Image (spheres, rainbow, N blue to C red):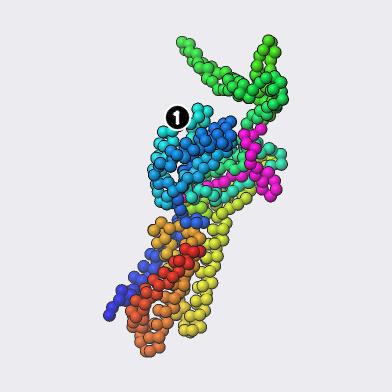
């Protein structure tokens, strides 16, 4: 009874061509397949952030968080909702069901939020909605910038203006977020005792700042042959400008901001502080696009970082604090090392038991072609090269080795019984085509739960 294996045994040129096609397809996939630390997850979430300046956590919860939660809960595709109310801010995280369309959920939730926008306090800012996938929760790389001379707000300003745009422009980078940064802000630390003595309330200070610090375009003037744009300084620029701001004028007496407050150029937020090796630092997280090769992207980021390090101002130091792709590279290296060790052991065992160099050639050729060709199938079905698929590759080596050894041993047995090489190959392959398929399916069924648990 003939088998489809006869075609490849009788036509060695066809077998070589098919092997080369599998090898080329696998090598192409090896260069372009997406490399990740973990498999891509389709679990997304939507974050709704609402700022309510001046309100404590209880007010934010009662007037912002609770109404928004009730409205958002009516949207489709929601698994569960988390919320956090803090002073001046409300954060609601909506976890979506597995594989639910995040864009559809965003549109639905946005319409629910807009419907109750008029019920929120007038001083509350417009809620900001943002889609977050499970892949963007942790950055693939964290950069640390420290300085013995510059203050954290000065370091942050430099990163925002010069470093962040360059890293964002690197191919495959989704975003470069500054973590622990301190943005420049004019800080007005009011003195309660002085304000009480002069009968001035915080609301008066806030209103006066709003009326005297704003941007306004004056306009332009036209002549018969000339048009001139007019400009005017309508905002405050320096600490002294703010200090001289008049809060109240009564009977010729002026009460300036410097009389009731300390004015300094500081940062917007002092609630967080980042340290690297015991030194104050500003971090920058590099997030990779979901469909990008993380290893290649971070390699390009490292190259750009080397150029940035040479251009940093005196006293400022930048370095890579954490690189998730280092673990991926180590895992790939260990897998390759395991495959090489396996190939050498198989060669030695087959030679010792069969005593033939010709028999050794079969697994030496079959194992690499099978594994490299498997990369093409992985790419074809949308899989990425990650820790789980690497584990599957290691386990699949056993399948290839078992099949190769069984076939080689059976052919050798027929040769010793006096068959010719061609007949021994034909009969040996025919006898084992069924058992090999059954054995492969059985071992795959056993290995699959092990790989999933790993």
Of 10 and 288, the residue lying toward us: 288
- Above or below: residue 353 compared with residue 203: below
- Above or below: residue 223 compared with residue 324: above
Residue 241 visible in the shown view = no
- Above or below: residue 332 compared with residue 210: below
> What are the residue bounds of the magenta stretch?
266-291
- Above or below: residue 396 compared with residue 170: below
Residue at the spot of label 1:
118
Q: Is residue 286 magenta?
A: yes
Q: How many marks?
A: 1
Residue 425, by quadrant, is bottom left
Residue 371, by quadrant, is bottom left
Residue 107 visible in the shown view = yes
Q: Position of residue 292 (x, y in %)?
A: 47, 51
Q: Position of residue 101 (x, y in %)?
A: 39, 47
Residue 358, by quadrant, is bottom left
Q: Is residue 205 left or right of residue 332?
A: right
Point 42% across, 82% down: residue: 409
Q: Is residue 224 magenta?
A: no
Point 45% across, 74% down: residue: 401
Of 317 and 212, the residue lying toward us: 212
């Amino acid at each position: 009874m003939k088998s489809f294996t006869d075609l490849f045994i009788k036509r060695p040129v066809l077998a070589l061509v098919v092997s080369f096609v599998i090898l080329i397809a696998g090598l192409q996939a090896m260069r372009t397949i997406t490399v990740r630390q973990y498999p891509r997850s389709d679990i997304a979430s939507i974050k709704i952030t609402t700022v309510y300046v001046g309100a404590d956590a209880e007010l934010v919860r009662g007037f912002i968080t609770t109404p928004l939660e009730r409205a958002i809960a009516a949207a489709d595709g929601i698994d569960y909702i988390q919320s956090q109310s803090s002073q001046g801010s409300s954060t609601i995280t909506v976890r979506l069901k597995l594989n639910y369309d995040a864009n559809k959920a965003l549109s639905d939730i946005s319409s629910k939020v807009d419907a109750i926008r008029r019920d929120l306090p007038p001083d509350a800012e417009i809620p900001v909605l943002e889609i977050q996938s499970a892949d963007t929760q942790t950055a693939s790389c964290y950069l640390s910038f420290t300085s013995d001379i510059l203050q954290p707000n000065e370091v942050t300003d430099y990163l925002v203006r010069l470093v962040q745009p360059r890293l964002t422009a690197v191919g495959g980078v989704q975003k470069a977020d500054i973590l622990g940064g301190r943005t420049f802000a004019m800080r007005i630390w009011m003195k309660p005792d002085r304000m009480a003595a002069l009968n001035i309330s915080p609301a008066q200070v806030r209103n006066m700042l709003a009326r005297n610090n704003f941007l306004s375009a004056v306009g332009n003037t036209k002549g018969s042959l000339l048009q001139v744009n007019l400009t005017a300084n309508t905002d405050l620029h320096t600490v002294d400008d703010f200090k001289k701001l008049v809060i109240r004028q009564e009977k010729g007496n002026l009460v300036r901001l410097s009389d009731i407050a300390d004015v300094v150029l500081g940062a917007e937020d002092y609630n967080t502080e980042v340290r690297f090796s015991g030194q104050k630092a500003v971090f920058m997280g590099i997030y990779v696009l979901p469909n990008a090769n993380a290893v290649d992207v971070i390699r390009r980021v490292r190259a750009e970082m080397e150029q940035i390090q040479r251009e940093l101002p005196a006293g400022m130091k930048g370095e890579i604090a954490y690189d998730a792709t280092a673990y991926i590279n180590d895992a790939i290296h260990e897998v390759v090392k395991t495959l090489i060790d396996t190939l050498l052991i198989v060669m030695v065992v087959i030679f010792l038991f069969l005593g033939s160099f010709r028999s050794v050639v079969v697994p030496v050729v079959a194992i690499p072609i099978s594994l490299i060709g498997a990369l093409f199938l992985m790419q074809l079905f949308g899989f990425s090269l990650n820790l789980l698929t690497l584990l599957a590759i290691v386990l699949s080596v056993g399948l290839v080795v078992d099949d190769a050894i069984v076939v080689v041993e059976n052919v050798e047995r027929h040769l010793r019984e006096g068959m010719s090489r061609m007949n021994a190959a034909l009969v040996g392959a025919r006898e084992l085509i069924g058992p090999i398929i059954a054995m492969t399916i059985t071992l795959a069924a056993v290995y699959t739960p092990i790989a999933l648990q790993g």
